Amino acid sequence: MRGIAYGVGVGPGDPELMTLKAVRLIKENDIIAVPGKEPKESVAYRIAAGAVPEIENKTLVPLNFPMVKDRELIDREHKNNAKVIEKYLDQGKNVVFLTLGDSTVYCTFSYVQHYLETDGYTVELVNGIPSFCAAAARLNISLTEWNEALHIIPASHETAEGLSFPGTNVLMKSASRMKDIKKSLKESGKLVQCVENCGMENEKVYKNVDEIPDDAGYFSLIIAKDTK
């Protein structure tokens, strides 16, 4: 019997926000796959370790996900990562892949999942609290009320166009274009707040667009709401 590959969301940063199911799967399985060359330096690993200290006694499998734009190289690494996981699955062992936030929202594991399923392996996704939900709670605001729409916009999207959508706009992975994004935010007339490193020790909260630094970190999430 082949094992099962689990894509497990560990939430945005606070170990207390991990689900009971995520904790149980980590405890019950010995093979833990972690994005990055040094598993114990991974943000996802550190979050999980805060809730499941015994994870350090597990077999940690590092998987390389290069931050480059060469699509051919990226696809090759995703395929290689799938093959690494498949070796354990073929031994009848389950593999728990740790991923930040939720396993269905801009998730690193999804790229590997495609190859695993194509090769005939069983994959199960385990939800974690998404970063935008955690950031809204940290700001003590609702994302949507009544008939408001919610739009999740990645940094690769044209920001000005995205901010024209009515309702609440969530900008994810925006740090690399922060200066330009701030300009679009100011022009949008929306109410803007931002959380950097939500739930982590170095968390920072910005209550308006002018407070957001141009060099805000990678884990910076912006919530822009229509004025009422």
Image (spheres, grey):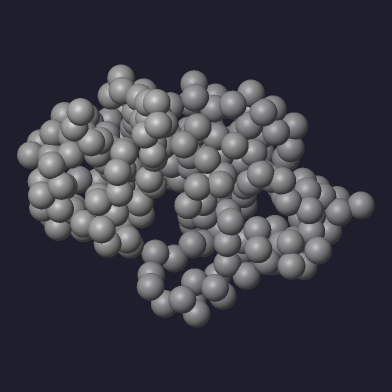
Residue at 48% of width from left, 42% of height from top? 100
Residue at 74% of width from left, 67% of height from top? 118
Q: Tell which of 101 and 146 is nearer to you.
A: 146
Q: Tell which of 31 and 98 is nearer to you.
A: 98
Residue 111, image x, y percentages: 58, 62
Q: Residue furthest front?
A: 147
Q: Tell which of 196 and 95 is nearer to you.
A: 196
* Residue 228 to residue 93: above or below: above
Query: Is residue 203 visible to the viewer in this orientation of the structure?
Result: yes
Quarter occupied by residue 76: bottom right
Q: Quadrant of the C terminus?
A: top left
Q: How many marks?
A: 0
Q: Residue furthest right?
A: 1
Query: Is residue 174 visible to the viewer in this orientation of the structure?
Result: no
Quarter occupied by residue 207: top left
* Residue 161 to residue 145: above or below: below
* Residue 96 to residue 200: above or below: below
Residue 114, image x, y percentages: 65, 63
Residue at 42% of width from left, 77% of height from top? 70
Q: Is residue 72 left or right of residue 180?
A: right
Quarter occupied by residue 210: top left
Q: Residue furthest left?
A: 210
Q: Is residue 172 left or right of residue 164?
A: right
Q: Residue furthest bottom?
A: 72
Q: Tell which of 76 and 165 is nearer to you.
A: 165
Q: Is residue 47 left or right of residue 220?
A: right
Residue 217, image x, y percentages: 25, 46
Residue 158, image x, y percentages: 27, 62
Residue at 13% of width from left, 42% of height from top? 189
